[in-house]
Amino acid sequence: MPFSIFTDSSANLTKETLAALNVFVISLTYEVNGEEHLCYDPNVEFDGDLFYSKLKNPDYHVRTSMINSERFRVAFEQELSADRDVLYIAMSSMISGTYQAAMSAREELLSVYPERKINVVDTRAASLGEGLVVCHAALMREDGKTIEEITTWAEDASKLVRQHFMVDDM
């Protein structure tokens, strides 16, 4: 049965990698002085240096936002209505409500599409840790693995991922 793989912009995968692996991204957002921007937009190069300089500058009010359940519902429903199941590989539920929003959309959509599968995996990671799980899952799909096999692998692998990061200052 065909299925689509989704992740969020927290995975930090390039548009070239996403296209090569046929993975869809649902983007988190950020605001600068009330103006909303996508964290991932395939048509706009994200300027990390500019973002972090504004974050440090008191003249700018910068905040980030999770993906809400409605955005998940719309994205997932496109695939479900085309008779494709969905596997969403999420950033850590410990740092964002994004995973829970995906689960809410899942519950709502399964009542409309009871014959479809919507699997959601909490990677317990972000950035490279999340991205590696996504990439390997996409390669497993290319090798003919089922959505169930990949979901089980991703859940198991996510328990083994360890990440460390450093901040410039507190």
Image: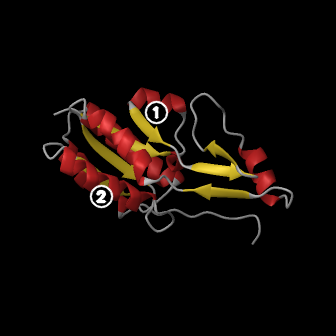
Q: What is the quadrant of the C terminus in the image?
A: bottom right
Task: Report the residue at 28% width, 31% height from top.
Answer: 142
Q: What is the quadrant of the N terminus in the image?
A: top left
Label 1 sits on what residue type?
Answer: Leu
Q: Residue 97, percent across and down? A: 46, 63
Q: Residue 25, percent across and down? A: 46, 39
Label 2 sits on what residue type?
Answer: Glu
Task: Report the residue at 43% width, 64% height from top.
Answer: 93
Q: Return the residue nearer the eye: 8 or 68.
A: 68
Q: Return the residue nearer the eye: 57 or 125.
A: 57
Q: Residue 81, percent across and down? A: 25, 33
Which residue is label 2 attached to? 155
Q: Residue 41, percent across and down? A: 58, 35
Rendered image: mark on residue 18: 1
How packed mark 1 is, by other alpha carbons closer than 10 Å (few <14, some 14-19, many 20 or more), is: some
**Can residue 66 be seen in this snapshot?**
yes
Q: In this view, does 68 lie above or below 75?
A: below
Q: Is residue 92 above or below residue 77?
A: below
